[in-house]
Image: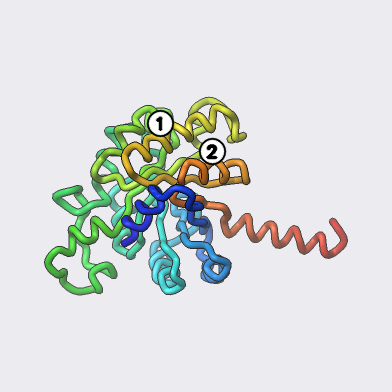
Amino acid sequence: MVRKAIRRRATRKGRAPAPAFWLEYPSLPACEIAASLGYRIAILDMEHGVFSREVADSLVFACHMLGLIVYSRVATAERVPIQHALDSGVDGVILPQITDLAHAEAATALAKYPPLGSRGVGYSRTMKYAGVARGFFAAENRRTACFAMIETPGALRDVAAIVRLATVDGLFIGPADLSMTRGRGAFRASREDFADFRKVAGAAKSAGKPWAIPAPGRVVFAFASRQQASFVTVGDDLSALRTGLAQGLVVAGGR
């Protein structure tokens, strides 16, 4: 199961983080290319990307057919976006803009069926569009991962308590927003940034749960590897497109 796989990766020393990529636009070829290159995880960015619910639903199915683990960073940490993502069959949700422990407790509960949480029941792909067998709800709680994003001062302050919530399966750092909300401006991979990252990684490891981070460069990726991150996002569809188009101009004469 996905939760067991990410938990094993989080606790096995010397294992490189699984490579993940952001999908900002609904591009099936981008998913096919990424899977063929060896990416393991696709993250549908519903917070900043451009997706309709119907297209996202289809992409989840397609990514699974390609052998990718699929997470959805939902648009907001609220009931309807979380349930839409989980009902489509994603392997987990990433909840943005968590403000503190109280917010984390309320928001992450929406990702788990009772009695663990308060996720609503809707008959969907996860149930094969039929009724449910005995034990389904507990199994679905185990199958799906809920990552709380740590990208605000309050969430960072409360991170040790947040990660120990029964409804939280792991942590996902938002470097850009964390730097901004901590008063440092644009993310520069500063000493202060890494101090924040170590606090998050330490809290996750202490609780025996995975953590993850986007890596805009080799320095952050190396840090994530040393700190036993479960997965690291190392690219996205739009940046890859820009890099490819820029290379075309190099071929055309270095313009």
**Mark 2 falls on what kind of element?**
helix
Image quadrant in which you'd find residue 36: bottom right
Query: Would you place residue 237 above or below residue 181 in this image?
Result: below
Pinpoint residue 72: horizontal percent, then vertical percent.
Answer: 40, 56
Q: Which residue is drawn at 49% across and 45% down?
A: 213
Q: Which residue occupies the extreme right position in the image?
A: 253
Relative to 167, 187 lies left or right:
right
Q: Which residue occupies the extreme left position in the image?
A: 134
Q: Which residue is drawn at 30% across and 36% down?
A: 103
Q: Nearer the viewer, residue 206 or 49?
A: 206
Q: In which quarter of the image is the N terminus?
A: bottom left
Q: Which mark is residue 156?
A: 1
Q: Residue at x 50, y 54 (%)?
A: 49
Pinpoint residue 46: horizontal percent, then vertical percent.
Answer: 44, 54
The residue wearing badge 2 is 176
Asked if residue 76 shows in the view, the reply is no
Asked if residue 89 shows in the view, the reply is yes
Pinpoint residue 105: horizontal percent, then vertical percent.
Answer: 26, 38
Relative to 147, 239 lies left or right:
right
**Mark 1 falls on what kind of element?**
helix
Check disc 2: other Cα within 10 Å, few if <14, some if 14-19, many if 20+. some
Label 2 or label 1, whichever comes before in sequence order: 1
Query: Would you place residue 52 above or below residue 211 in this image?
Result: below
Q: Which residue is drawn at 80% across and 61% down?
A: 249
Pinpoint residue 130: horizontal percent, then vertical percent.
Answer: 19, 74
Q: What residue type is labelled 1?
A: Leu
Mark nearest the camera among 2 and 1 is 1
